[in-house]
């Protein structure tokens, strides 16, 4: 017997797994959706921040007096102290709130700061130039790599692999609107964590003059819509705290959103990774040894060793050395699947080059070594499906072989992610008039969370989607975790299913006497409550609810829960394949097609799930070809903190994308998150396709300059 | 009343806040179409020479979605900031703020423009169309409907700009190919990666706007 | 953006007295995409902005014996949709359409395209057109110069001209009219672009009290003209290198050629060497390649932009081969 808290079997699903249009589509596609940036509160002031023009400096003095007298300015707060050290360009110094945005900008320019400019490091690729900013970590070894590389029956492939830092570049910049009423505060936050930032703010304000009465319970956080986070929006951040102080000081609501350059300078980046990698493999393709010397930066904290060798973790002989490089650049924040895209690029790149050295098709080489992975069966299925959808057999050619100016190539890569669901509580209320209310303190980052909740509840009740009123994005609802690490959909689907089943059981109890059966004999389908196996005995949903008289049913479902169930799991795999064209005269790479094969257990909302995968692939086109932070070591400045030279793909720059969600096979595992998994392999797949096209390895982003340089060094133009 | 966050504009209503109370709060007559003469709508008139105004606030009349709004703003205020900060028309978004990303797109005299680098005062006497003017959740324009159907939005922050740019494009190109769409929407950027849906949505909307006729 | 006075004159006569006698006093506003961005970044902080939006005469396209007169306020969209332009000046249409944003084409004007400031990121960060730090150190030679000049860069100026139309207009032999209260002067577009040699100089031959009013493109006379741009993105993106050519043909032989490269030098770069290499030759793969090699023979790439020599070479070769087919 399946447990009570399973999802319905495939043949009984009317909504789960179907292509359903997202609930918030109409408000978004008509401009009616209100984001934090869009909040206009009565009497609201607009705040702007002064940020450091230096990559490394100490503040000698700050004089805000002229700013405070500036027309329209109502409050100024300091965000750094005199003698405070600023570790990257963009570091926050002070904030000014004024009646108009223009006045706030004027006010910021009137703050006088004297700096002690200190030495900085803003570039890390050339390890010979990082000096004391490079911190080596202890060497890690397994087996006997020295012996394995020296063996006479192995082929050794050696290469250099580089992937630069990128920023999050959320289109809605980070920020908040804060409004006080006595000790109570409402925060319209652009956040991935409505349940967390209020507590963060209360903690930050504790002990500050004027905020002694403020408790977490005093702070209400609202996020109905959020304009992109990708892992960078979990904290209230210094600017949220500054907005709260400005608002309190001025006695008016305050909006403080980062300017675009500030967003790119300081509100999140993905660490770089550079590595010299050696792989030893036998002639038949069996990998026997791995050796890597890697380095990376995550900004002021250095960059950690990426999880390499990636996916193929069981290579028997391994040696890894890593240097964390501290740079005076905006700090790293989680970026969809932290460290995994880089690890996939390093590992799948080195493996592809090894296959080329063995004169083996990388598809065969990857398949050959699946015993070194944790879920070989999944990857086998996905690689074979991907090869079919890509028509790999007819498109693959040995690396660098092909004629003409425009060369084509195909590449592949794999990825994995955990995604253990976060805690979540869902409250379902069934009213006597038949309406159903779902409340949860989660947030929809645009991934379709609202839609998922409605699908799970409506499926459980046998009701149409629009019968469920979904309320989220408010910290006063039952708590649900922050949306990061692909933890949301598993958590919220489970809590919703549990709450719905519990509520339905209560309803069945209320109507069982009328249908002259016991409650366990009832089912809810097609807008009716009926006796299982005897559809003639039924009543409409509305009539059933009317039996509640004057009282509601209100039930809370929790994830995790002690009762048995099979509602979610963690750990998935994905295989992507890319086809590219390289103009060998200009070095311009065009991605023609990407095939993304992904498992994520049971898919609740197929349409928005596919959108997640499309989006991950498109972001990979951006970062494999265009995105990089460009720093000037002389001045310490980021020269492209704008959207003109911090380049993102436009609509004409993206390939055909084929998404294949592995469904059915792994449904019984329950729901598993999808935010990170598809973001892992596509960059590596695209880079490997370029290698296949031109026979030479190019660092990411693969700009014309790099492609032409690589071709000049030994590629086959 | 709690806010309905499913299908409607979601402003928490706990203090009875409305767009009108915001507009009063900032001292603007939002519905002040009264008594506005053509003179104010036209570009500044000249007798012997052109009038120089500013740098302080000046009266600027903007015809937005068919309705005239009077503002007292400095000449440096952009069209985008005037609408977002003074008139609570927040469909157009501030993203790059430097004429690159298209999130601020409005239609001025029939052409898509970047409102972040258009001065509000320069838009006097012109016909300004924003997303609020041609589509609502209850009565969606074909472009919006096609965006919804094709899931051409994720976080949705670029979406209004895309919808407006797409409408302006389709108003002049009734029967576009995929290649035309790629060029016609080259002035807008998305971060979540919704372009696959956007492409199909624009093609679907074109067909719908032609009256369901296939190309 | 710093606050400013604003005026919207309805004819040139009204406009002239509103202009300043030196830079910094007043700026002329055309489409606004560049000027307002510069002002938001405080790179330009004019006390007065004089809009040309109300001056009707600047929006006209008309023909005279001297050729096609294109008003400075004609938008890039109007330019690329103009029947006469489409018939005779494919290179201009291609250059305008290379700006792959409808918003930019509907706002941007032909005058604004010629007068826009360089995109050099040091300039845009406030280090000046010559990109020097507070100690006077030149930042470009040892800095981030991937998009900077490969030709004409032996002086202190190492930015590249951002103009999209400039190279095509120069290849077509166009002139600009610069008007002021003291009268008009007409300058070859080629001479309009300048390479500053010291601080305070601008990169165009426009005085603070002048307005660029029109562009005059001589009759094409059957010259084959094309523009080829190397851009990394299909969507709105700055070219890495461009080439515009205008070829007077005699049968399949090039009688005379005008060859101009874009985004490679502080001005559009006229290559007499390429023109000479083509004169009297049939147009084919090998003569196109020879011309491209001649055009780039004297290139002096900076530390990071040798690739642009290759790209400019390819752009010119492809522009010539496209012209052969035109």
Image (tube, rainbow, N blue to C red):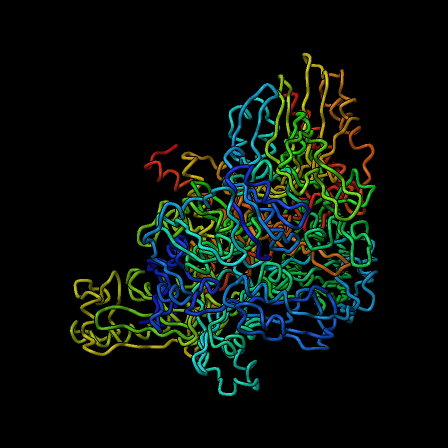
Residue sitting at the far top: C251
- Residue A406 location in percent, x, y? 66, 34
Decide if residue A520 is on the left or right side of residue C6.
Answer: left
Q: Is residue C303 above or below residue C92?
A: below
Q: Residue at x 59, y 67 (%)?
A: A107
- Give the quadrant of residue A124: bottom right
Residue C46 visible in image: yes
C173 displayed left or right of A96: right
Image quadrant for the N terminus of chain B? bottom left
Question: Residue A553: x percent and y percent?
Answer: 27, 76
Considering depth in this image, is B43 or A162 the residue closer to the camera? B43
Taking the image as shown, residue C2 lies to the left or right of residue A673, namely right
Q: Is C9 located above or below residue A662 in the figure?
A: above
- Of residue A358 and residue B4, the one placed in the foreground of this image is B4
**Residue A544's x, y, as percent?**
20, 70
Within the image, what quadrant is residue A134 found in?
bottom right
Residue A560, compared with residue A710, is above or below; it is below
Q: Looking at the image, which is closer to me, B14 or B182?
A: B14
Total tally of numbered discs in the picture: 0
Q: Is residue C62 left or right of residue A430?
A: right
Q: In which quadrant will I find the C terminus of chain B?
A: top left
Q: Is residue B157 visible?
A: no
Residue at image location 39% in from the left, 73% down from the top: A426
Residue C172: % across, % down: 66, 25
């Amino acid at each position: 017997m399946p447990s009570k808290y399973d999802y319905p079997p495939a043949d009984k699903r009317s909504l789960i797994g179907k292509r359903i249009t997202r609930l918030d589509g109409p408000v978004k596609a008509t401009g009616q959706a209100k984001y934090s940036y869009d909040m206009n509160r009565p009497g609201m002031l607009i705040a702007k921040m002064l940020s450091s023009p230096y990559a490394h400096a100490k503040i000698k003095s700050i004089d805000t007096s002229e700013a405070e007298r500036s027309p329209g300015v109502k409050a100024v707060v300091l965000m750094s102290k005199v003698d405070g050290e600023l570790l990257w360009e963009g570091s926050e110094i002070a904030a000014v709130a004024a009646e108009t945005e223009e006045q706030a900008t004027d006010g910021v320019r009137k703050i006088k700061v004297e700096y002690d400019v200190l030495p900085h490091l803003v570039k890390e690729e050339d390890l010979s130039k990082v000096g004391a900013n490079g911190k080596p970590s202890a060497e890690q070894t397994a087996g006997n790599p020295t012996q394995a590389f020296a063996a006479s029956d192995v082929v050794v492939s050696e290469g250099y692999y580089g992937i630069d830092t990128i920023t999050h570049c959320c289109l809605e910049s980070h920020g908040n609107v804060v409004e006080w009423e006595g000790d109570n505060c409402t925060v319209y936050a652009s956040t991935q964590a409505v349940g967390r930032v209020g507590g963060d703010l209360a903690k930050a304000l504790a002990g500050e003059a004027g905020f002694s009465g403020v408790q977490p319970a005093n702070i209400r956080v609202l996020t109905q819509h959020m304009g992109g986070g990708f892992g960078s929006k979990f904290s209230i951040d210094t600017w949220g705290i500054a907005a709260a102080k400005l608002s309190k000081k001025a006695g008016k609501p305050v909006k403080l959103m980062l300017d675009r350059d500030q967003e790119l300078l300081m509100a999140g980046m993905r660490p770089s990774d550079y590595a010299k990698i050696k792989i030893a493999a036998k002639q038949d393709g069996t990998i026997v040894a791995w050796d890597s010397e890697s380095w990376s930066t995550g900004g002021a904290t250095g960059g950690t060793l990426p999880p390499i060798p990636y996916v193929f973790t069981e290579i028997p002989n391994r040696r890894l050395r890593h240097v964390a490089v501290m740079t005076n650049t905006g700090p790293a924040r989680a970026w969809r699947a932290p460290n995994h895209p880089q690890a996939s690029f390093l590992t799948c790149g080195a493996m592809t080059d090894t296959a080329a050295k063995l004169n083996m098709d990388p598809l065969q080489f990857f398949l050959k070594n699946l015993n070194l992975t944790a879920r070989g069966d999944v990857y086998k299925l996905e690689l074979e499906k991907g090869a079919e959808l890509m028509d790999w057999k007819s498109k693959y050619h040995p690396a660098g072989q092909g004629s003409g100016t425009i060369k084509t190539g195909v590449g592949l890569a794999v990825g994995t992610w955990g995604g253990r669901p976060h805690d979540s509580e869902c409250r379902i209320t069934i009213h006597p008039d038949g309406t159903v209310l779902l409340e949860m303190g989660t947030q929809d980052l645009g991934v379709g969370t609202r839609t998922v909740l409605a699908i799970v509840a409506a499926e459980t009740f046998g009701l149409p989607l629009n019968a469920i009123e979904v309320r989220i994005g408010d910290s006063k609802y039952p708590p649900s975790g922050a949306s990061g690490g692909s933890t949301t959909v598993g958590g919220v689907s489970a809590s919703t299913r549990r709450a719905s089943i519990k509520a339905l059981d209560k309803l069945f109890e209320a109507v069982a006497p009328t249908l002259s059966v016991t409650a366990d004999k009832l089912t809810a389908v097609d807008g009716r409550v009926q006796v299982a196996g005897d559809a003639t005995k039924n009543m409409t949903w509305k009539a059933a609810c009317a039996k509640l008289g004057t009282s509601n049913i209100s039930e809370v479902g929790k994830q995790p829960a002690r009762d048995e169930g099979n509602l979610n799991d963690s750990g998935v795999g994905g295989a992507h394949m890319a086809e590219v064209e390289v103009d060998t005269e200009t070095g311009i790479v065009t991605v023609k097609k990407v095939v993304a094969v992904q498992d994520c257990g049971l898919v609740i909302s197929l349409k928005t799930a596919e959108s997640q995968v499309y989006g991950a692939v498109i972001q990979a086109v951006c970062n494999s070809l265009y995105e990089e932070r460009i720093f000037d070591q002389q001045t310490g400045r980021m020269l492209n903190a704008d959207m003109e030279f911090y380049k993102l793909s436009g609509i004409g720059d993206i390939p055909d994308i084929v998404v294949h969600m592995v469904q059915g096979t792994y449904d019984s595992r329950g729901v598993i998150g999808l935010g990170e998994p598809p973001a892992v392999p596509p960059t590596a797949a695209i880079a490997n396709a370029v290698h296949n096209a031109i026979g030479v390895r190019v660092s990411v982003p693969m700009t014309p300059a790099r492609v032409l340089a690589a071709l000049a060094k030994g590629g086959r133009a | 009343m709690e806010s309905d966050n499913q299908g409607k504009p979601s402003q928490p209503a706990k203090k009875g806040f409305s767009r009108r109370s915001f507009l009063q709060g900032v001292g603007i007559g939002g519905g002040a179409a009264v008594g506005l003469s053509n003179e104010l709508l036209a570009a500044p008139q000249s007798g012997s020479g052109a009038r120089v105004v500013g740098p302080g606030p000046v009266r600027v009349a903007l015809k937005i979605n068919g309705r005239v709004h009077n503002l007292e703003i400095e000449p440096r205020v952009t069209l985008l900031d005037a609408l977002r900060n003074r008139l609570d028309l927040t469909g157009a978004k501030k993203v790059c703020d430097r004429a690159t990303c298209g999130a601020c797109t409005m239609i001025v005299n029939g052409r898509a423009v970047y409102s972040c680098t258009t001065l509000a005062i320069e838009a006097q006497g012109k016909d300004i169309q924003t997303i609020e003017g041609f589509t609502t959740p209850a009565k969606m324009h074909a472009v919006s409907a096609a965006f919804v159907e094709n899931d051409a939005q994720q976080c949705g922050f670029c979406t209004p700009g895309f919808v407006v740019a797409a409408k302006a494009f389709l108003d002049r190109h009734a029967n576009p190919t995929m290649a035309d769409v790629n060029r016609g929407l080259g002035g807008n950027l998305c971060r979540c990666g919704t372009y696959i849906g956007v492409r199909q949505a624009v093609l679907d909307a074109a067909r719908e706007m032609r009256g369901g006729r296939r190309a | 953006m710093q606050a400013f006075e604003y005026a919207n004159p309805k004819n040139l006569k009204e406009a002239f007295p509103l202009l300043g006698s030196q830079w910094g006093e007043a700026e002329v506003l055309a489409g606004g995409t560049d000027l307002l961005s510069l002002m938001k970044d405080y790179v330009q902080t004019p006390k007065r902005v004089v809009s040309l939006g109300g001056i009707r005469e600047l929006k006209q396209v008309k023909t005279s014996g001297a050729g096609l007169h294109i008003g400075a306020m004609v938008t890039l969209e109007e330019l690329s949709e103009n029947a006469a332009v489409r018939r005779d000046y494919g290179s201009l249409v291609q250059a305008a359409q290379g700006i792959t944003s409808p918003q930019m084409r509907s706002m941007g004007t032909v005058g604004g395209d010629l007068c826009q400031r360089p995109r050099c990121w040091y300039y845009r960060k406030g280090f000046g057109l010559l990109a020097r730090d507070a100690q006077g150190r030149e930042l470009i030679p040892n800095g981030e110069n991937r998009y900077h000049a490969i030709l004409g860069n032996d002086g202190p100026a190492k930015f590249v001209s951002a103009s999209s139309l400039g190279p095509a207009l120069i290849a077509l032999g166009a002139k600009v009219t610069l008007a002021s209260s003291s009268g008009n002067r007409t300058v070859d577009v080629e001479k309009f672009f300048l390479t500053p040699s010291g601080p305070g100089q601008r990169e165009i031959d426009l005085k603070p009290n002048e307005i660029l009013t029109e562009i005059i493109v001589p009759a094409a006379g059957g010259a084959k003209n094309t523009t080829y741009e190397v851009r990394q993105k299909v969507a709105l993106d700055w070219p890495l290198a461009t080439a515009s050519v205008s070829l007077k043909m005699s049968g399949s032989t090039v009688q005379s050629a005008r060859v101009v490269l874009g985004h490679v030098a502080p001005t559009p770069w006229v290559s007499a060497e390429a023109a000479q290499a083509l004169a009297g030759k049939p147009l084919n793969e090998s003569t196109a390649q020879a011309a491209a090699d001649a055009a780039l023979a004297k290139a002096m790439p900076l530390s990071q932009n040798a690739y642009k020599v290759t790209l400019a070479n390819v752009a010119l070769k492809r522009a010539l081969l496209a012209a052969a087919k035109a």
